[in-house]
Image (cartoon, rainbow, N blue to C red):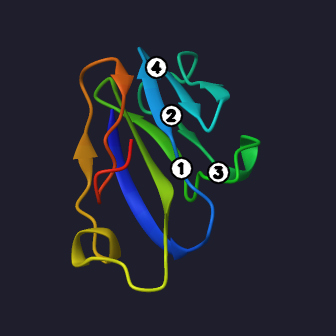
Amino acid sequence: MHISFSPMRRDDTLEVSKTGDVLTINGETLDLSALPDGATLPADAVSCEWITGPIERIDGEIHLTLILPHGANPSPEVAFPDPITVSTDGPITLPGGAS
């Protein structure tokens, strides 16, 4: 799973975990297993405020963008996060060290 980030000034927190093609985002489950290879799902097709931009499956791998909340003075790692590739199940460590 390839996850990009869109930093946003917000006071709430984000916790994400992965089990196969299922993401759990702040306790809500998002099952992406039915998304076929080469398909694109618009962000507004899922009821998740943390997804921004389309969700795609490219060569078998899911690609999506999550909002990355941060406080008033984020570190450069949080303000300008690199995308991550997640291949193992479990909690996902987000830029800035949050999981």
Q: Can you identify the residue that label 1 sits on?
A: 14
Residue 20 appears in which quarter of the rendering?
top left
Image coordinates for residue 88, horizontal then vertical, percent: 26, 19
* Rendered residue at 28%/66% (across/down): 81
| Between discs 3 and 4, the one toward the N terminus | 4
The image shows residue 76 at horizontal and vertical percentages of 23, 78
Report how far apart the C-alphas of labels 3 and 1 lie in the structure: 18 Å
Q: Position of residue 29 (x, y in %)?
A: 65, 25
Q: Please state which of the two labelled residues, at mark 3 or mark 1, is closer to the viewer.
A: 1
Q: Amino acid at mark 4?
A: Asp
Q: Which residue is mark 4?
A: 21
Q: Earlier in the sequence, mark 4 or mark 1?
A: 1
Secondary structure of the residue carrying tag 4 is loop
The C terminus - image quarter: top left
From the image, state whether disc 4 or disc 2 is nearer to you.
4
Separation of disc 2 and disc 1 at Cα? 26 Å
Going from N to C along the chain, the mark reached first, 2 or 1, is 1
From the viewer's perspective, is residue 39 above or below residue 73?
above
Residue at image point 73% right, 51% down: 44
Of 61 and 16, nearer the camera is 16
Mark 1 neighbour density, 10 Å: few (under 14) some (14–19) many (20 or more): some
In this orientation, which residue lies closer to the viewer: 32 or 58? Answer: 32
At horizontal 36% and vertical 78% (from top left) the residue drawn is 74
Q: Which mark is residue 63?
A: none
Question: What distance separates the C-alpha of mark 2 from that of mark 3?
Answer: 13 Å
Residue 12 in the figure: left or right of residue 6: right
| SS class, disc 3 | helix
Between the residue at mark 4 and the residue at mark 2, the CA separation in whole angstroms equals 14 Å
The picture quadrant where one finds residue 1 is: top left
Residue on which the image places disc 3? 43
The residue wearing badge 2 is: 39
> Mark 4 to mark 1: distance in Å?
19 Å
